[in-house]
Image: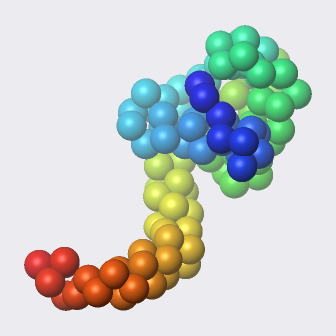
Amino acid sequence: MEFDVNKPIYIQIADNLCERILSGEFKPGSRIPSVREWGATIGVNPNTVARSYELLTDRQVIFNQRGIGFFVANDAIDVIRERERRKFIEEELPLFRSRATLLGIDLKQFIN
């Protein structure tokens, strides 16, 4: 995994796990790699992975079964999609619209 220096690594790890869930690599109800396993796989400190897992747990994307590991929540796909849709509408779409306007792109023509 390659990291962007402009974004905290733990957030990039969380985003990557969400993408993997949406792609079906990690299915709802399935176990995900442990903090140590994932840290070794992507070459980061386990504490950074633990922070990512904590973030995803707070967002109810994954959950921890003590002594067994972390699992993808049954409604993780819906939770991720809702958050990403909101983020797209609130953050990315206004930037897209502004850029399109500056470039003289007619959005009605673009949509069709």
Between residue 85 and residue 5, name the one nearer to us: 5
User: Is 69 left or right of 83, judged from the image as shown?
Assistant: right
**Picture residue at 84% right of the left edge, 21% below the top:** 45
Q: Considering the image in quadrants, where does the N terminus appear?
A: top right
Q: Residue at x 19, y 77 (%)?
A: 110
| Number of marks present in the image shown | 0
Image spot of residue 33 (x, y percent):
65, 19
Could you tell me if residue 68 is visible in this image? Answer: no
* Residue at figure coordinates x 43%, y 42% from the top left: 22
Q: Is residue 85 above or below residue 74?
A: below
Of 3 and 56, nearer the camera is 3
- Residue 39 on image: x %, y %: 74, 19
Looking at this rendering, what residue extends furthest in the front direction? 103
User: How has the structure been colored for display?
Assistant: rainbow
The residue furthest right is 47
Q: Nearer the viewer, residue 2 or 31?
A: 2
Quadrant placement of the C terminus: bottom left
- Percent across and percent down for residue 85 are 47, 67
- Horizontal arrangement in the rendering, residue 20 relative to residue 48 (left or right): left
Residue at the location (72% across, 49% down)?
6
87 above or below 67? Answer: below
Is residue 15 in view from this perspective? yes
Residue 69 percent location from the top left of the image: 73, 22
Quadrant of the rendered structure where residue 10 is? top right
Q: Left or right: 66 with respect to 85?
A: right
Residue 51: quarter of image: top right
Q: Residue furthest left?
A: 112
Q: Quadrant of residue 31?
A: top right
Q: Is residue 103 above or below residue 33?
A: below
